[in-house]
Amino acid sequence: MNNNKVILIIDDDSKNIFALSAVLKARKFSCISALSAREGLLLMEQNPDIGVVLMDMMMPEMDGYEAIGRMKAEENLKNIPVIAVTAQAMTGDREKCLEAGADGYISKPVNVDELLQLLNQIMN
């Protein structure tokens, strides 16, 4: 399953980006990344090949909730699926992310099989 869509990873921790990219690239996905939601939104505006966004929900400046809200308000971005990635695996977090407009939810540390399953559902 390798379509030509790019996965955008938005996370303020470069170690998380590195780990996720390595895993995804090993499975022949193309990845680009941004260290802030603002940078991620800019990349989405510039790159029509982005097929899905892995969005860290806890970031300084603009968090994932605000970023998803902004995406959903933009005509050209609102149909890009978002998987919320969060270290907050508390009761209600999943619902909170999905209510914010995320299409999927995964908690850190990321379970690779779970992530690949989600990507398969969303990208096909």
Image (cartoon, helix red, strand yellow):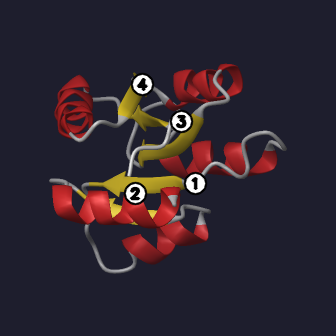
Residue 96 shows in this picture: yes
Q: Earlier in the sequence, mark 1 or mark 2?
A: 1
Nearer the camera: disc 2 or disc 3: 2
* Residue 9 sits above or below residue 89 on the image: above
Q: Which of marks 1 and 4 is nearer the N terminus?
A: 4
Q: Earlier in the sequence, mark 3 or mark 4?
A: 4
Distance from label 3 to label 4 (Cα)?
Answer: 19 Å
Residue 88 shows in this picture: no
Mark 2 residue element: helix
Residue 117 image label:
none
Give the residue at mark 4. 32
Type of the residue with mark 3:
Met
* Residue 89 sits above or below residue 66 on the image: below
Circles 1 and 4: CB atoms closer than 8 Å: no
* Residue 47 spot, x, y in % from top left: 63, 23
Give the residue at mark 1. 81
Q: Earlier in the sequence, mark 2 or mark 4?
A: 4
Residue 119 image label:
2
Foreground residue, 50 or 17? 50
Q: Which of marks 3 and 1 is nearer the N terminus?
A: 3
